């Protein structure tokens, strides 16, 4: 049993073969995939992927590379 702890399956490069990528991972023993959002749009895509594939789980929030763009409403800060 393996867990891929950091994927970006929402990226356009997987649009043509996303189902096959997930199926190949499962066929090779990857039973859980953590799909990581990097911004609000990809967080929504990550949660949609988690709803679509039972082995995919969404990690949402602010990616460290995007931290300087985060606003208080995005991170749930106290005003
Ligand atoms: Zn990443």
Image: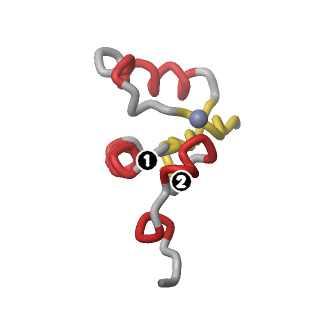
Residue at left offset 38%, top offset 43%: 42
Q: In this rendering, would 69 be left or right of 50? A: right
List x then y, in percent, for residue 49.
37, 42
| Residue drawn at the location 50% of the way across and 19% of the way down | 24
- In the rendered view, tell whether residue 9 sits above or below residue 72: above
**Residue 16: x percent and y percent?**
29, 15
Q: Residue furthest right?
A: 1
Q: Residues within 10 Å of mark 1 (few under 14, many from 20)?
A: some
Indicate whether 48 appears above or below 7: below
Task: In the displayed orientation, state which residue is furthest to the bottom.
Answer: 79
Residue highlighted by disc 2 = 62
Relative side of 31 to 2, left or right? left
- Judging depth in this view, the residue of 29 and 49 nearest the camera is 49
Residue 16 relative to residue 71: left or right: left
Percent across and percent down for residue 57 are 50, 49
Q: Estimate the x, y position of residue 2 in percent, counting from the top left.
A: 69, 35
Q: Quadrant of residue 15?
A: top left
**Residue under circle 1?**
39
User: In percent of the image, x 55 and y 33: which residue is there?
Assistant: 7
Disc 1 + disc 2, Cβ < 8 Å: yes
């Amino acid at each position: 049993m393996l867990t891929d702890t950091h994927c970006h399956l929402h990226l356009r490069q997987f649009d043509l073969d996303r189902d096959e990528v997930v199926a190949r991972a499962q066929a090779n023993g990857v039973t859980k995939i953590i799909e990581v959002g990097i911004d609000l749009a990809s967080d929504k895509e990550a949660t949609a992927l988690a709803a679509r594939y039972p082995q995919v789980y969404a990690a949402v929030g602010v990616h460290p590379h995007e931290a300087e763009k985060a606003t208080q409403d995005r991170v749930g800060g106290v005003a």
